[in-house]
Image (cartoon, rainbow, N blue to C red):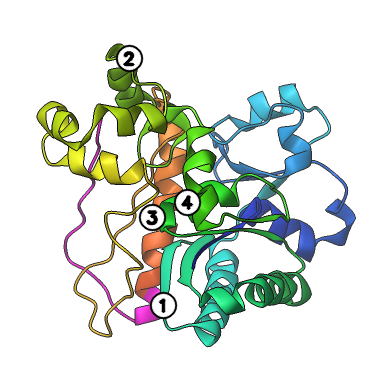
Amino acid sequence: MIFCVDMDAFFASVEKASKPHLKDKPVAVIGAKERTVVTTACYIARKYGVKTGMSKYEAEKMCPFINMVVGNNRKYTYISSQIMDFFKTLTDKVEVYSVDEAFLQIPDEEAVDAIVDIKNYVKKHFGITCSVGAGKSKLVAKMASGINKPDGSLVISDDKTIDFLDSFKLEDIWGIGKKLSERFYNTGVFNTADIRKLGREKLCKMFGKNGHYYYMMAYGDDREGIRVEDETVKSIGHSMTFPEDVRDTRMFNAYLLQLCEMVSGRARRHNVSGRTIVLSIRF
């Protein structure tokens, strides 16, 4: 079974855990510069409309009593590395997807106990929570991890996978997004059930080799399984699919900062450096 373990509002949660007086208060993590943006906000702040990418002035307008905390990236990457190392005591199949998220492959018979162990470890050692999704693939696990946030878990059995995926709009399916979903909508395809009806052959005619992948997705299958890092690291990269089109430069920069921290954190763990940086933008 594949797990997706996602820390809940990771940066903000770490700050609240290290500053007990902020426990029940709205918190936003920001950069050190005067004209900076929110990199993440706790769930209390989100209820007031505070979002990633907002300027701190916009956040204060939405929530006048919000507590702004300058981020400490070294602290976040250190805690992340400790959590990832714990995952590797449970299984050797661990894919570090980002600084606050990972995929694990766990034997089916150990799944329930592993979820409890993971959640207990994170809460006991760092005072934060995580949400766990589990299913037949990374796709299903990723979708399941977001259902009962924060501090939740959801296991999707194989026989429930198709019904589970069919319950989502295409734009909410991990890996599809708004722009691709609009192409599907224009052809009368509105969910994964419609993708299966369309069939592999028609999908390949419409989308080329990606059509085969979309057909697999409609059944809850992945293009690839857990990617375990080799001992010899030749390259390190991370990608992120935005929940919606991003036109605001400040929001783009906030996401870019998160990606940079993910990459640099992994580089430090492997004690490597690089000479070439590549930024890919897909639109």
Q: Callout 4, which amino acid?
A: Val
Residue 229 in sight here:
yes
Q: Where is residue 268 in the image (x, y as percent from the top left)?
A: 39, 75
Q: Earlier in the sequence, mark 4 or mark 2?
A: 4
Q: In which quarter of the image is residue 269?
A: bottom left
Residue drawn 89% across the image and 56% down it? 21
Q: Earlier in the sequence, mark 4 or mark 3?
A: 4
Q: Nearer the viewer, mark 2 or mark 1?
A: 2
> Mark 2: few, some, or many residues within 10 Å (few <14, many ≥20)?
few
* Distance in Å between CA atoms under marks 3 and 1: 24 Å
Q: Callout 2, which amino acid?
A: Gly
Range shown magenta: 268-283
Q: Which of marks 2 and 3 is nearer the N terminus?
A: 2
Q: Callout 3, which amino acid?
A: Cys
Q: Callout 1, which amino acid?
A: Lys
Residue 265 in sight here:
no
Say which mark, if any, is on residue 260: 3
Q: What element carries label 1?
A: loop
Residue bearing the label numbered 2: 188
Q: Is residue 195 above or below residue 104?
A: above
Q: Nearer the viewer, mark 3 or mark 1?
A: 1
Whether 280 is among the magenta residues is yes
15 relative position to 189: left or right: right
Q: Which of marks 4 and 1 is in front?
A: 4
Say which mark, if any, is on residue 140: 4
